[in-house]
Image (spheres, helix red, strand yellow):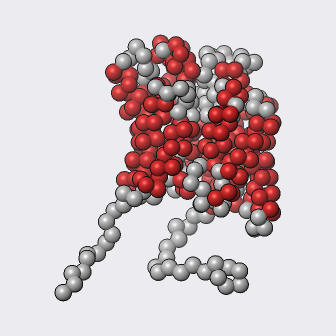
Amino acid sequence: MANGKLLVGSHAPYLHIGSSITSKSYDIMIAGLPAVIFGISQYGVPALRVVALSISTAMLWEFLMNRAMKKPITIGDGDAAVIGLLIGMLLPATAPWWFVALGTLLAVLVGKQIYGGIGCNPMNPPVVAIAALMLSWSRLLDFNAALTSYDFGFPAMFPLTAIKYFGPSAAENYTLAGLMMGQQAGGIGTTFGLGLIVGGLYLILRGSIRWELALSFLAGVFVTAFLFHAANPAKYAPALFHVLTGYTLIGAFFLITEDSTSPVNLVPMLFYGIGAGFLTVMIRNVGFYVDGVIFAVLMMNLASPLIDKIRPKALGRKLEHA
């Protein structure tokens, strides 16, 4: 410790990949725009209010935490804005103001700052917040109850609720093309499948997320759902239906790929993504909750340090002592 600054020493050489927290945050916000704009056009001014309030309160909580802990102000790096954007995308357009503000407070305080800030959090902050809200006020996150005042021109029931309680025959009311184009009820930024895929491809091409995580998660969802459907097609929905509904696509490209909570090595990333996909479908088909993405990601967050111990062998050879 010198002049109040912590000195950290490590061996050379050093290599910087040219990325930064700020540039990555801006990339995520740009990638989320198609889905958010579509959600606002579909749900109107209430959706705009939720997204704007979510982003602004997340930045406010981070600013207040920085001041309270006498740390440098970090809202300029864009991470708090990303947290707010993702929470806004996951919420219904009818979420009350206190619900939105509480969600961002939980994400910033409990999910991030309490552990030391960005890079120190063991769990994804928006996922922590949505899980807490889901457990405490499930009614407000019930899209069927929350969106009853909207006349969409397509089946208004949340697709995953329809198949869970009415069987896979309910999936016939939806088309895969319609699901891709947002013809389903859900969170503000979670229904426009095509927009989420385009945003995800943008993040992959920019190098802001690891494609191994996103694709292994989608593969885990697809294969697990396929096996369920093959075993009992009269009870379980087809695999592509699971991929294109609920929080699956936003989970693949925006939640499971968060750096602080995901593995860094190739094989662990594949285990991590496939495991989250498997748990997602298990919760949907066997568990109590309609959509399992949030809890699946949360459980894999906690398992990530253990999974990441599966590492490649170091270069070199062991010296034999005489």
Asked if residue 322 is positioned above or below residue 147 in the image, the reply reads below
Q: Residue furthest bottom?
A: 322
Residue at image point 79% right, 48% down: 56
Question: Closest to the observer: 114 or 66?
Answer: 114
Q: Which of 49 and 227 is in front in this view?
A: 227
| Residue 153 x %, y % | 66, 16
Work out which quarter of the rendered image holds the C terminus and state it. bottom left
- For the N terminus, the quadrant is bottom right
Residue appearing at x 29%, y 75% in the figure: 316
Horizontal and vertical percent position of residue 222: 41, 32
Identity of the residue drawn at 36% across and 57% down: 310
- Kindly indicate the quadrant of the structure image that contains residue 179: top right
In the image, residue 61 above or below residue 247: below
Q: Where is residue 24 in the image (x, y as percent from the top left)?
A: 61, 57
- Give the residue drawn at x 60%, y 60%: 120
Please indicate, yes or no, whether residue 122 appears anywhere in the rendered image. yes
Percent across and percent down for residue 82 are 67, 50
Kindly tell me whether residue 89 is visible in this rendering: no
Residue 188: name its quadrant: top right
Q: Nearer the viewer, residue 8 or 205?
A: 8
Tell whether 302 sits left or right of 121. Answer: left
Q: Up-down: is 215 above or below 246?
A: below
Q: Is residue 224 left or right of residue 302?
A: left
